Image: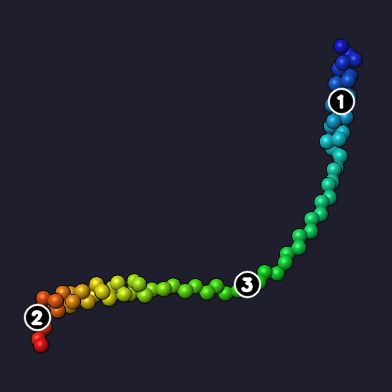
Amino acid sequence: MIRKCFVIFGAILLVSAFGCTRHEVKTESKVEVAPIKVEPIHITIDLNIKIDKELDDFFSDLDEEAAETPADE
């Protein structure tokens, strides 16, 4: 029993001795960054369809009036 206590005590001393020492791990990493080429982005949006539809809606009342009245010849 006493021998078992000495073994456990010795193991605790050994572990605590390693815990009190200073451990240092050196790591190095090197990252190379390539230059980024920045170019403008050209975006073309075709709005002709929307404008054409709005013009049809705007002039639709005039077209209806022209269709209702007989044309003078």
Q: Position of residue 17 (x, y in %)?
A: 87, 33
Q: Residue at x 73, y 64 (%)?
A: 33
In the rendered structure, which amino acid carries the disc numbered 2?
A: Pro
Q: Amino acid at mark 3?
A: Val
Give the SS element for disc 2.
loop
Contact (CB < 8 A) between labels 2 and 3? no
- For the residues labelled 1 and 2, the Cα–Cα distance comes to 114 Å
Q: Look at discs 2 and 3 and give the one toward the viewer.
A: 2
Estimate the spatial distance between the alpha carbons at disc 2 and disc 3, rounded to whole Å. Answer: 63 Å
**Left or right: where 67 falls relative to 33:** left
The answer to which quarter of the image holds residue 31 is bottom right
The residue identified by callout 3 is 38
Tell me the CA gap for discs 1 and 3. 63 Å
Image location (x, y in percent) of residue 23: 85, 43
Which of the labelled discs sits on residue 70, or is there none?
A: 2
Q: Which residue is mark 1?
A: 11
Lower sequence index among marks 1 and 2: 1
Query: Which mark is first along the chain, 3 or 1?
Result: 1
Give residue 20's quadrant in the image: top right
- Quarter holding the N terminus is top right
* Tag in front: 1 or 3: 3
Left/right of residue 34 with respect to residue 73 in the rendered view: right
